[in-house]
Image: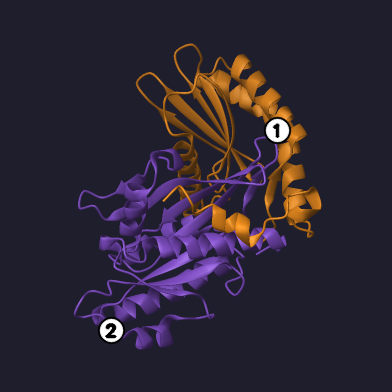
Chain colours: A orange, B purple
């Protein structure tokens, strides 16, 4: 990979959660999701529908990646945001820096204009956190430098006991 | 790029099943999904065409348990094998922490295997993923078919970096979990070393 592990620390998690809650309130959104561009869910808040969050995250990341592929084909560096209009729920997706995607779901209690405005206002604060994460992932030294516990062969073998 | 969430104490890794069309990539995931305890798996997401050919990707999230207080999650993806979905394959390979190459053992698919391997290496390179160091396994699927080529011939042509080779009949589950275990172990071992792939 071009970088090392992507690591989310406790204080970053708290900061991202605060920002997501602020966006949720200010945009009158149904839920807000933060996803890494490879499809890993990073955090959620709001009234989450009864769906598999991992699946939702991977589909959103795939959607963004495919849309960026389309942008490239027509000579655009990227499409900054995407909007999917449903009958009652709508999705607004935008990229945050180089590593994250912001998903905002909203309904008739809000509007596309309000969501876009609030996303634009808060994006720099989100990006500040993700820039730190990205910078860390580019630095050599590995996860051990941050105290990831020593994983032994026995630990790995033990994973295959009960699940299969 | 494994994702380590210290707040939730979770480690998440992405494994991609790669290979030529109709080689058995989706079948591997379907078998794992069928035979895994409900608590340990998420929903199998398949974006397929009406004829059940993979259109974009399949995804199976697995919760493998806990290591030293960290929940270990793996996300298994397949790529669409058909030649004209090259752009989709490139997207899915992005961020992969490990790759299983599912080769079709049939003689008629020999060239398709080689083409797919070439395609894989090209996409890894495009994402700055170093092929020699990424966790990797070679699964020789469809070993039960009378048209299957001898194992040694396939290994001579398809084994690129002394990776583990697993013989499989994915529709019967033979070799499926062996392949998964091999790639999971390599991926976690890589994480242990802290080595950036």
Q: Is residue B95 visible?
A: no
State the residue at coordinates (61%, 58%).
Answer: A154
On the image, the x and y values in percent for residue B47 come to 33, 47
Q: Is residue A1 above or below residue A15?
A: below
Q: Is residue B79 above or below residue A102?
A: below
What secondary structure is found at the residue carrying circle 1? Answer: helix
State the residue at coordinates (42%, 40%).
Answer: B42
| Residue ranking furthest to the top | A109
Front-most of residues B32 and A117: B32
Q: Depth-wise, is mark 2 or mark 1 nearer the camera?
A: 2
Give me the C-alpha separation between circle 2 and circle 1.
52 Å
Q: Within 10 angstroms of label 1, few (less than 14), some, or many (20 or more) residues?
A: some
Q: Is residue A117 left or right of residue A83?
A: right
Q: Is residue B109 above or below residue A97?
A: below
Any mark on residue A55, and which? none
Q: Which residue is mark 1?
A: A13
On the image, the x and y values in percent for residue B58 come to 38, 50
Front-most of residues A4 and B61: B61
On the image, the x and y values in percent for residue B14 come to 53, 53
Chain containing mark 1: A
Q: Is residue A157 above or below residue B66?
A: below
On the image, the x and y values in percent for residue A13 come to 70, 33
Q: Are marks 2 and 1 on the same chain?
A: no
Q: Which residue is mark 2?
A: B149
């Amino acid at each position: 990979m071009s970088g090392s592990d992507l690591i989310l620390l406790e204080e970053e998690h708290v900061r991202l959660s605060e920002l997501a809650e602020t966006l949720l309130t200010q945009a009158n959104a149904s839920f807000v999701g933060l996803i890494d561009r490879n499809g890993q869910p990073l955090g959620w808040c709001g009234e989450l529908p009864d769906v598999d969050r991992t699946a939702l995250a991977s589909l959103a990341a795939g959607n963004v990646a495919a849309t960026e592929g389309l942008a490239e084909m027509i000579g655009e560096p990227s499409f900054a945001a995407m909007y999917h209009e449903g009958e009652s729920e709508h999705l607004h997706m935008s990229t945050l820096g180089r590593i994250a995607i912001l998903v905002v779901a909203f309904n008739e209690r809000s509007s596309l204009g309000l969501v876009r405005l609030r996303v634009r206002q808060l994006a720099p604060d989100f990006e500040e956190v993700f820039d730190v994460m990205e910078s860390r992932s580019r630095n050599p030294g590995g996860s051990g430098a941050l105290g990831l516990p020593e994983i032994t062969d026995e630990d790995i073998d033990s994973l295959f006991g009960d699940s299969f | 790029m494994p994702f380590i969430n210290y707040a939730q104490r979770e480690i998440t890794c992405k494994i991609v099943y790669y290979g030529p069309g109709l080689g058995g990539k989706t079948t591997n995931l379907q078998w794992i999904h069928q035979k895994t305890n409900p608590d340990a798996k998420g929903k199998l997401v398949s974006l397929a065409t009406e004829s059940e050919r993979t259109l974009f990707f399949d995804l199976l999230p697995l919760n493998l348990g806990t290591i030293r207080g960290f929940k270990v999650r793996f996300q298994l993806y397949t790529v669409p094998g058909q030649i004209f979905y090259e752009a989709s394959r490139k997207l899915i390979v992005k961020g992969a922490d490990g790759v299983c190459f599912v080769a079709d053992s049939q003689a008629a698919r020999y060239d398709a295997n080689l083409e797919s391997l070439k395609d894989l290496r090209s996409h890894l390179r495009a994402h700055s993923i170093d092929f020699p160091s990424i966790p990797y396994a070679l699964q020789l699927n469809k070993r039960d078919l009378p048209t299957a080529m001898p194992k040694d011939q396939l290994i001579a042509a398809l084994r690129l970096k002394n990776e583990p080779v697993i013989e499989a009949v994915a529709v019967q589950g033979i070799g499926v979990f062996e392949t998964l275990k091999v790639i999971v172990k390599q991926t976690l071992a890589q994480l242990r070393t802290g080595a950036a792939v």
